[in-house]
Image (cartoon, rainbow, N blue to C red):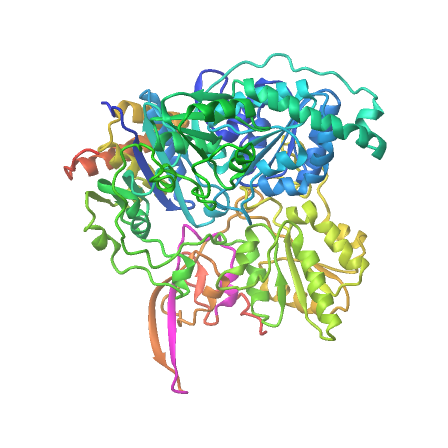
Amino acid sequence: MDIGERTLNVLLAGIGGQGVLTASQLLTEAAVLAGHDVKKSEVHGMAQRGGVVTSHVRIGRKVYSPIISSGEVDMLVAFEEAEALRWRSEVRPGGTLIVNCLRVLPPVVNLGLFKYPDDPLASLRTFDGAFLPVEASTLAIEAGSPRLAGTILMGAAAALLPLSVAHWEAAIRSRFSAPEVADQNLKAFQRGRECALSQKLHLV
Amino acid sequence: MTKHHRLTAPATSGRVLMSGNEAVARGAWEAGVTVASSYPGTPATEILEAFARYPGVYAEWAPNEKVAFEVAMGASLAGARSLVSMKHVGLNVAADPLMTGSYIGVRGGFLVVVSDDVGMGSSQNAQDTRYFARFAKVPLFEPSDSHEAKAFVAEALNLSERMDTPVIVRLTTRISHVKGLVELGERPAPPFLGFSKDPAKYVILPAHARKKRPKVLQRLKDLARLADTSPLNVIEWCDRQTGIIASGPAYVYAREAFPEASFLKLGVSFPLAEGLIREFASQVKRLYIVEELEGIVEADVLAMGIRVDSVGKLPRTGELTPRRVRTALDGAGLKVAEAPPSPPDLEMLPFPRPPTLCSGCPHMGVFYTIGKMKDLVITGDIGCYTLGVGSPWNATHTCVCMGASLGNALGIEKAYRMASQEQKVVALIGDSTFLHSGMTGLLDIVYNGGNVTVFILDNRTVGMTGGQDHPGTGVTLQEEKSKPVDFVALCRALGVEHVQLVDPYRLPEVYRAVKEALAHPGPSVIVTNQPCILIEEFHRTQPYEVLDELCNGCGACLKTGCPAIQVVRREVVRLPNGRDKELSYVTIDPVGCNGCDLCVQTCGPKAIVPLGSSVPTTAGAEPQS
């Protein structure tokens, strides 16, 4: 598996508390184990309080910029449907869009100040590239904890990224030191990966 | 549970992923720093958190950046290597000792590590710390990633000792919060010289200061000469048609945007390596300067009489990206890296997702209560509770800087009084912000007879930055027990006669306390006493649920602002007076709900009950205001 001369740009986007940074850590560790140079940017502070959280992960031979330029994302992993809408314009034409089928209404919508889009997934289907909706939150609850959604999404991403499963699994074991938590996450990872493989999308 | 769980041992060897903040901490440890102080602030917070985990160090949270600076400076005067870290606006607070610290110099190496929040992700302004280096006449280092952050710290400490000066290491959010690979090293025995009584150096009387100033100016000249040969200032020759001077973080964006250009990368960006810059400029056909935020190097290079082809082209707001640099310098004769087409113009998302308070946040009870009192002017401060400005509370009307709520409140009240009008003013300030720089404001209110009501929202942590300890929590950064501040006793000692302690989850109690405080002629303080829900002192209780058959859609619970409450359906009904009213039927997210019962108190039809029980609770209804 080789990513060649180019730098692979993955954007993870979700909501504070959804585990976006934990998921991006798995991807980053897997890439390091595969011998790549990696930069991973995170959002801290004010933006974590139920607001939008993004993490840019860039993988390559030598990575300079820690952030991905607008419109140059190869793969967007959105942890929520409306967040997929918010960030899809960052994805290059022909890129990949993985979306967790989950809607989280912020207080501004509950208060009636703004409207949540009627059907984000329907709008996303017009996306020019590979589109992969994943029932990650539903599968996560089935697997024992809603917190597994991020790992399931990473499993789906793994099916489309040029990193070996062994490196992903090692990254999961290194991130979750308790063996039972690691096993749970490894299963969740596999579940996400199967989900993506069954849809027969092309590689990034 | 963010608090008290991070003191695990750091990695010991090899090549590891580290954020810029972690790399600074590692670099400081390897270079023999033994004393470090800080006040939490995004994006700099994790520097001290990471440093505190290393063996053989003293690391502390100070009440504010000025004290932190003075502590680290004190350690340097004692002949130890030391470090103070802060966010950019923290250096405003610490500017006083910085300006004179430059004159006094150091004994042990002394670093001032500052992280600039260029994109204002979590800050009230975007200021460029490179100006402070020029203002204080101290050298400034600018690493461009984690690897350099660690290496530059060691170099900066050496320079500090060699040239008898504090050194600023300037990071930005994209250095602090970006993880990259770092090679770990060893820590030799830390140097320690001990204090040496030398009043001409350490006692800055005017007579001493007058002798120091020419020395400071000479030091700058010497530093500039050293910058010319510093290994941190490097020329990367490529196509000599185009040369780019880039300092620190801006380098990585420019390097990626223009892979075929020649580069002069400035790791030491003040004082400028004038000789090197002249040499570089003379050998390239066109010269561009790429820097983030302000055009500081650009102005200095122009002042050297050198032609710069990028004047006025770089954006001066927001963070750079390779694309922004490429676009800004487009048409400047540069060969650019192959770039994908610009992103298509897609419809924008119809709603924003601003940060919110957490489910069950103890601040909500206060906002809910005072947000309804429309005749109040409410001055706010820096912390999670600045979010009180938003809907549904609209309970914060000013926010300036750490501690400003009190002075602002007094000024507003006095101005109304001078206009022969009365205005009730409430100041909102958090526990840590009050200890940082609110106490003096309260003292002013007492001293000058201000009729102001102050809320000290004591949630026993620095919440917004992720749950750090402070002098009010009774625990230090290195997890030693200490004596916590007694806020009620402190306010009384400052001269406030009307001080109340309230439970912010008891709405009738909060309401009564506010009414009483506002009626009191003179300064009054209300201290709240419930912990932040993200720290271990908070005990989650059984979540609540909404009995759908009892919910009448009145939406009163939504006025708490709790994000666990979700609207499941809306209905418009015609009222007897002929007007339409929208009803909002709700549910409670059982995972998000922390069981605080604030919403229960607002529910008229008693439709909110403990999860799993079908018996309505007997909690009181909302107080009448």
Residue B185 vs B206, above or below: the answer is above
Furthest toward the top, the residue is B188
Q: Which residues are magenta?
A: B577-603
Which sits in the foreground, B472 or A12? A12
Residue drawn at point x = 61 percent, y = 54 percent: B400
Q: How far across and down, in percent of the image, does residue A105 sit?
A: 36, 57
Specify the quadrant of the image occupied by residue B49: top right
Question: Horizontally, is A107 left or right of A202 in the view?
Answer: right
Q: Quadrant of the C terminus of chain B?
A: bottom right
Residue drawn at point x = 53 percent, y = 48 percent: B533
Say whether residue B168 is visible. Answer: yes
**Can residue B179 be found in the magenta stretch?**
no
Specify the quadrant of the image occupied by residue A20: top left
Residue drawn at point x = 54 percent, y = 70 percent: B622
Which sits in the foreground, B161 or B444? B161
Q: How far across and down, in percent of the image, does residue B324 sit?
A: 38, 41
Which sits in the foreground, B12 or A72? A72
Question: Horizontally, is A113 left or right of B457 in the view?
Answer: left
**Can residue B596 be found in the magenta stretch?**
yes
Specify the quadrant of the image occupied by residue A130: top left
Residue B585 vs A192, above or below: the answer is below
Say whether residue B5 is visible. Answer: no
Question: Horizontally, is A78 left or right of B201 in the view?
Answer: left
Residue A125 vs A74, above or below: the answer is below
Q: How far across and down, in percent of the image, does residue B3 sit?
A: 56, 38
Q: How far across and down, in percent of the image, does residue A160 sit?
A: 22, 33
